[in-house]
Amino acid sequence: MEPLAKVQEATKAAIERAFTNFKKCPKDRLSQAYLETRLETLEQHWAVFFKTQQDIVSTIDEDELQESDYYKDNVFDEVEELYMDYKSHIKEKLNMLVSLPTFKSHKESAPQSTQFKLPEIKIPTFSEACPVDLLGLTIGDLADPEYYKPNKIDVLLGAEVYSQVVRAGIERSASSRVLAQETTFGWILSGLVEADFHSFTNTTVMHVSMENDDMLKKFWELEGEPCVAKKMLTEEEVKCEQLFVATTRRDESGRYVVRLPFKDDIRSCAEGGSKQIAEKRFKGLEAKLLKNIKLKIDYSQVIHEYTELNHMVKVTKQEVNKKGLYLPHHAVIREDRATTKVRVVFDASCKGSNGISLNDNLMVGPTLQADLRHIIMRWRKHLICIVADIVKMYRQVLVDREDTSFQRILWRDNPEKEIEEHELLTVTFGTACAPFLAVRALQQVAYDEAQESPRIKEIILNDFYMDDLMTGTENVDDGYSIYSEIKATLAKGGFQLQKWISNSMELLHKIKEDVRDKDEGIKIEMDANITKILGLTWDPRTDSFQYSVDLPALIEPVTKRRVLSDISRLFDPLGWLAPSIIIAKTVIQQLWLAGIVWDEELPSELLSKWCTYRDILNALKNVRIPRWLHTKTSDKQVQFNGFSNASKNNLCSCNVY
């Protein structure tokens, strides 16, 4: 049992890593080739996992199986849900792309290519030299006697040199089409000459991208500074923003009510028999939940919470025939979450019988949040830092009842009961437009409710990354003022902040007293040890960052694919670990120079180097980076120093405040 369980754990870890890296990938890097490679790799992992599951069921004694951690932890169900969620995300992104035809090779190491035919072009070629005798010169007089033959460039001379080498002599041809100029090096020619044109009617351009090359894009480009130029919105993004401004309203409680941003009035997603597909998927989910009682209880609680919070209503008989769409749903389990560990994900990328999904009909909207690194760097400027997140951010924004029929789901607590139809009343996780609608509604609070408080407006617009708040100040009183004002401002729009964390215990105590006095059920992290902040590990007690290395156990044979998979897990957005990360980049270079294919075992020399590096990565856990940069608003001058260095293999630079 143990060897098979190890294979399953390794496959599970591979899928989790791939999904994590996929979610970190910038939007502009999601090419069709990249997404198709991701999907193909995922299917390969799932095929291995499913085959091993069959081996476990058929070869392992039932009593031994039930006593194993593999069975008790419901590993198969967890990975199946992870597989479905990851696949749904990939397909969602694929559906958003309009790509050129791609011709894929079935060979694992073969590149993927895109080709297209260009219009006919004519390229001039010189059949013979220009008759220089017409200029009164000989070939020997020229600076380049073979000027008509392509050759390498020996040296480039700037304009400042031209005046020093040019002489007085000038000769023109009778037609004045060619001019000869005397220089220190000899005569040079310029102008037009007769040439033969050869026509090429079949010019093919090949774009090649190596398989799995995109797996490391995030790793290679993480240190690159994003373009500072203001991004121009696409026509669709402008339309999405205009629709939000024109149709968004607020209900009597102050919550924002938004319309789903359909691309046009032809909502063909509703014509694909989505109810039958959703019912089939639901019965599969139901059978799975019956095998895992704990998961069924947790899943049912989440669904019931939707009803209790008025985030979902049962469809009445009068509304059943209204044009709409049914969303399949499944569970995603997040053991690392301090709050809800089971999340219900709605598959808005599920295509109907006509090949169209809800997400195909929705506009995505522009990306609104600031760059991750810029938020972190601003946060490091504050002596006292403040962290919180918004409770169920998506579900605080209501969807207009005109559109909720496109967010229907099927549910029942017991297989013996009839399946009921429900409509989700809030922005739904899984729809393509959800991030835009949620963030845009949050920012609208700043425009509507914080006009009298420029500081709070600035914090709402610039110090949020999705639902995570990262801000700060220089003293406790000012910190408490920020807490009070931003809490009150966001509450006007229906947003509530929770899980308040700070490096100042004095500030946390004041917040706790306020919460207790008002009898609010807001969580205050008084004893937080290690906290995940936008992918970084932060210890509020020491107010320092530390690095956590989460590599799976080494699996043999060690192949190029496994090495790159491990390297892609190294997340260092601010370049703190560059002296260590550069070694990983060197290993990648050596892998390519060695010509190793994806599933070939590393040669002994490279294997030894990789294993040694992999073992010492654990030492990174001892690295501590102070969060605060020791800057203050009273600073009149901040000096920024930089230096760089290079070796035979590497070039690096470093900036120091």
Image (spheres, rainbow, N blue to C red):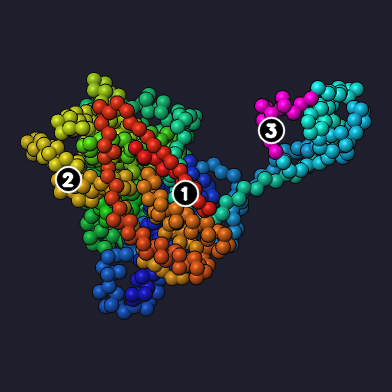
Type of the residue with mark 3: Leu
**C-alpha distance separating marks 1 and 3:** 36 Å
Q: Which mark is residue 157?
A: 3
Q: 531 above or below 243?
A: below
Can residue 650 be seen? Answer: yes
The disc placed on residue 306 is none
Q: Please check the rendered image and state whether residue 453 is part of the magenta-colored stretch, yes or no.
A: no
158 part of magenta stretch: yes
Mark 2 — residue? 525
Q: Nearer the viewer, residue 395 or 217?
A: 217
| Local secondary structure at mark 2 | loop
Rounded to the nearest whole Å, what is the CA distance between mark 2 and mark 1? 35 Å
Q: Is residue 187 positioned above or below 573 on the image?
A: above
Q: Nearer the viewer, residue 572 or 514?
A: 572
Q: Residues within 10 Å of mark 2 (few under 14, many from 20)?
A: some
Residue farthest left in this picture? 517
**Which region is colored magenta?**
155-167
Pointer 1: what residue?
220
